[in-house]
Structure formats: structure tokens, C-alpha cells
């Protein structure tokens, strides 16, 4: 943009390219009981192609 | 089409800011409990890859329980009016029928973490409120009185979402004093 900004800018299309590569929860992510209800069940990869 | 099938997951793409997902459980809400007391941080991420690792494993707004509030705020900014960085701020809000906000929620997150707003420094974070008949997405900002910055954010957000309705900006201070009677200070 010519402003000389150092901000790390990523377009939507660029970010979307990574969606399929990062399926697993981050290492060390703790699923405590109180947030379990926000999380999709662990076997998410099996349910993906059910459409 | 790529010439190589080798994934590049080992070269994480750092984001300009770190962001924290927060969740407020409807089950924990009660009239006795102070607002926000059941709100808790879920995970803080600072790379594109970490974002997707979380996003791909959480329910999107259409699947969250009625009453749920899901937040994505810059690290160290609490999604509360009382947070000193939010105290003088306000919010733009986009309204959706029940079950229709998933794509806009994702596009809002991507625009924020990808620093697509000209006045990104003004942004605290975003929240989606899941209610019985509707879903509401808001972007919280820091200095509500800075009209030029707020209007710029509102206009850009509408473009990113391809949102055709009128969008209003409410000062947190008005919301605190007037609750549902708070009026839009800016409109785009």
C-alpha cells in the first residue's frame, strides 16, 4: 500500500489456503469440562465428507 | 494447483497481533451471577496455522447453544466495558437471522487477524451473540469519539461481509447508561 507499514497483512484468500492443513487441535490444548460444549467432537475428520 | 504435495505446516505464519478466543457459557449464566463472570478465555493464538487449528475444532455460531457469546479479542484486552482499553469505545453490529452468521463470522475473524482494516489499531476484537431468533456480530473499537476511524472500519467491514443492511455504531457509554435505548451515533 506504499505506506511503509510493517504490519503483517494477509488477504482472506491467502488465509483460507491454510484451512485444510490445520485440522488438529494445537498441541497442549486442554479440553476442560466447561469448554467441552464449544468443541466439535474429536473425530471431526470423519464427519467432514458427510455432505 | 501445486507442483508439490508437501505441506508447509512447519513454517508458521506469524500474525501482527496475538488474539484470544473467549466463550461465555449460557449454562453458567444466571440472574444472580454478575455479567461476565462466566466468561473465560479458551485459547490465545499468534499464527495463521494456530487460528485454523482452533477454528476447525470449535462449533461455529449456527451450532452454538442459544445464549452463547463467542469472542475473539486482541491478547490482553478483555471483552468487557470495564477493560480500560474498551472503556471509551463502542461497537458496530451486523444482524443475521438464526443460523445465518457462520460465513460472516469467519470473514470478520479473517479480516481482523489478517489486518485488513486501515484502522486496525482501533479494533479491540469481535463477538458473536447467539440468541433464540437471531445472531449478532459486533466489532468493538477503542475510541468511539474518533468518528473518522469508526466510519472507516464500519464501511470496510460492510464490504468484507457484503452486508447490504444499514449498520449502526453504539458507544459503550450509551449502552451502559441506556441499555436497549442507546441510539446509533454513526451509521454506514
Image (spheres, helix red, strand yellow):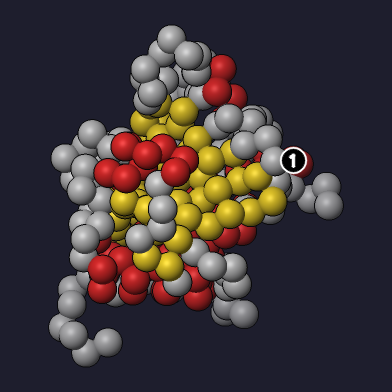
Q: Is residue B57 left or right of residue B132?
A: left
Q: Is residue B144 visible?
A: yes
Picture coordinates of residue B62, whole percent (x, y): 67, 43
Q: Using the rendered view, name the quadrant where residue A40 is placed.
A: top right
Q: Is residue B106 above or below residue B66?
A: below
Q: Nearer the viewer, residue A40 or A28?
A: A40
Q: Using the rendered view, name the quadrant where residue B59 is placed.
A: top right
Q: Is residue B94 above or below residue B45?
A: below
Chain letter behind tag 1: A
Q: Is residue B43 above or below residue B85?
A: above
Picture coordinates of residue B151, whole percent (x, y): 34, 71
Q: Which residue ends up furthest to the right in the rendered image? A: A51
Q: Nearer the viewer, residue B66 or B51?
A: B66
Q: Is residue B165 left or right of residue B153?
A: right
| Residue at 26%, 73% in the rendered image | B148
Q: Is residue A6 left or right of residue B92?
A: left
Picture coordinates of residue B117, whole percent (x, y): 34, 70
Quickly name the residue at label 1. Answer: A46
Q: Is residue B10 visible?
A: no
Picture coordinates of residue B71, whole percent (x, y): 43, 41
Q: Nearer the viewer, residue A30 or B156?
A: B156
| Residue at 59%, 39% in the rendered image | B130
| Residue at 59%, 25% in the rendered image | A37
Q: Which residue ends up furthest to the top in the rendered image? A: B32
Q: At numbered mark 1, what does the secondary structure look like: helix, strand or loop?
A: helix
Amino acid at each position: 500500500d506504499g505506506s511503509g507499514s510493517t504490519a503483517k497483512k494477509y488477504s482472506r484468500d491467502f488465509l483460507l489456503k491454510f484451512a485444510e492443513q490445520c485440522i488438529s487441535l494445537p498441541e497442549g490444548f486442554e479440553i476442560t469440562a466447561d469448554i467441552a460444549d464449544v468443541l466439535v467432537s474429536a473425530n471431526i475428520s470423519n464427519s467432514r465428507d458427510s455432505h | 494447483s501445486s507442483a508439490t504435495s508437501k505441506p508447509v505446516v512447519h513454517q508458521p505464519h506469524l500474525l501482527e497481533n496475538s488474539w484470544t478466543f473467549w466463550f461465555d457459557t449460557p449454562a453458567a449464566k444466571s440472574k444472580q451471577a454478575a455479567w461476565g463472570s462466566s466468561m473465560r478465555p479458551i485459547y490465545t493464538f499468534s499464527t495463521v496455522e494456530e487460528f485454523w487449528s482452533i477454528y476447525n475444532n470449535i462449533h461455529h455460531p449456527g451450532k452454538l447453544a442459544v445464549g452463547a457469546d463467542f469472542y475473539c479479542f486482541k491478547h490482553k484486552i478483555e471483552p468487557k466495558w470495564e477493560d480500560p482499553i474498551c472503556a471509551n469505545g463502542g461497537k458496530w453490529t451486523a444482524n443475521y437471522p438464526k443460523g445465518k452468521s457462520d460465513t460472516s463470522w469467519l470473514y470478520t475473524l479473517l479480516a481482523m487477524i489478517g489486518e485488513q482494516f486501515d484502522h486496525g489499531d482501533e479494533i479491540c476484537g469481535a463477538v458473536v451473540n447467539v440468541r433464540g431468533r437471531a445472531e449478532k456480530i459486533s466489532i468493538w473499537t477503542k475510541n468511539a469519539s474518533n468518528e473518522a476511524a469508526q466510519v472507516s472500519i464500519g464501511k470496510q467491514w460492510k464490504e468484507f461481509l457484503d452486508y447490504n443492511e444499514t449498520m449502526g455504531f453504539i458507544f459503550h457509554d450509551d449502552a451502559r447508561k441506556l441499555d436497549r435505548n442507546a441510539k446509533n451515533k454513526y451509521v454506514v
